[in-house]
């Protein structure tokens, strides 16, 4: 979606999913902030940087900018039914929001992998 991330993930034995999620958020925040700052064509640069900096000042755990919210909304997927429901929810979220008519047209969605024979997001992301 345009303002949040939905993902289904798990960790192998002795791995900490919360730590991995923190690292993902840290890495992506740094990369996205760098992209905003260094893109001369970004017309909303000043507004976004001011917003992220104002949010960053509200929390002592931020260096300067706050890109992600600190809380997460995990859901335990302890059955095939629960897994499939969340997967469908995630794939059809941009359709319900009116951005497109087919979930596999959302650029960075795993729906391409599930609904078409094209290579999609799952071929790009492998976290261990």
Image (spheres, helix red, strand yellow):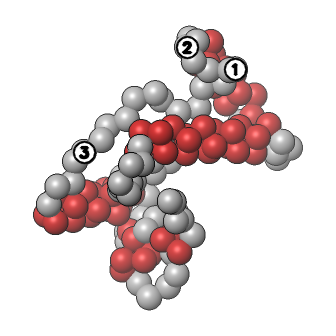
Query: Label 2 neighbourhood size at 10 Å, few (<14), some (14-19), many (20+)?
Result: few
Please provide percent x and percent y for residue 42: 77, 43
Drawn side of residue 41 relative to residue 91, left or right: right
Q: Secondary structure at mark 3?
A: loop
Comes first in the chain, label 3 or label 2: 2
Q: Nearer the viewer, residue 55 or 41?
A: 55
Q: Where does label 1 land, which residue? A: 64
What is the tally of numbered marks visible in this picture? 3
Please provide percent x and percent y for residue 111: 39, 71
Write the residue at 75% across / 34% down: 45
Query: Label 3 neighbourhood size at 10 Å, few (<14), some (14-19), many (20+)?
Result: few
Q: Where does label 3 land, which residue? A: 75
Comes first in the chain, label 1 or label 2: 2
Mark 1 to mark 2 CA distance (whole Å): 9 Å
Mark 3 to mark 2 CA distance (whole Å): 26 Å
Q: Nearer the viewer, residue 109 or 60?
A: 60
Q: Secondary structure at mark 2?
A: loop
Q: In the figure, 58 relative to 3: above or below?
A: above
Write the residue at 22% across / 48% down: 76
Please provide percent x and percent y for residue 123: 53, 75
Q: Where does label 2 land, which residue? A: 59
Mark 1 to mark 3 CA distance (whole Å): 30 Å
Q: In the figure, 125 relative to 36: above or below?
A: below
Asked whether residue 95 is in view, the answer is: yes
Labelled disc at residue 49: none
Q: In the figure, 24 relative to 99: above or below?
A: above
Q: Secondary structure at mark 1?
A: loop
Query: Label 1 neighbourhood size at 10 Å, few (<14), some (14-19), many (20+)?
Result: some
Please provide percent x and percent y for residue 36: 74, 40
């Amino acid at each position: 979606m345009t303002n949040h991330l939905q993902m289904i993930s798990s960790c192998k034995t002795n791995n900490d999913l919360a730590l991995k999620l923190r690292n993902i958020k840290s890495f992506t925040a740094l990369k996205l902030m760098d992209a905003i700052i260094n893109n001369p064509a970004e017309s909303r640069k000043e507004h976004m940087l001011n917003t992220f900096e104002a949010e960053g000042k509200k929390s002592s755990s931020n260096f300067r900018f706050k890109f992600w919210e600190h809380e997460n909304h995990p859901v335990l997927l302890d059955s095939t039914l629960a897994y499939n429901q969340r997967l469908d929810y995630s794939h059809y979220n941009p359709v319900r929001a009116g951005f497109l008519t087919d979930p596999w047209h959302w650029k960075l969605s795993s729906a391409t992998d599930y609904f078409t024979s094209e290579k999609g997001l799952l071929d790009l992301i492998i976290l261990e």
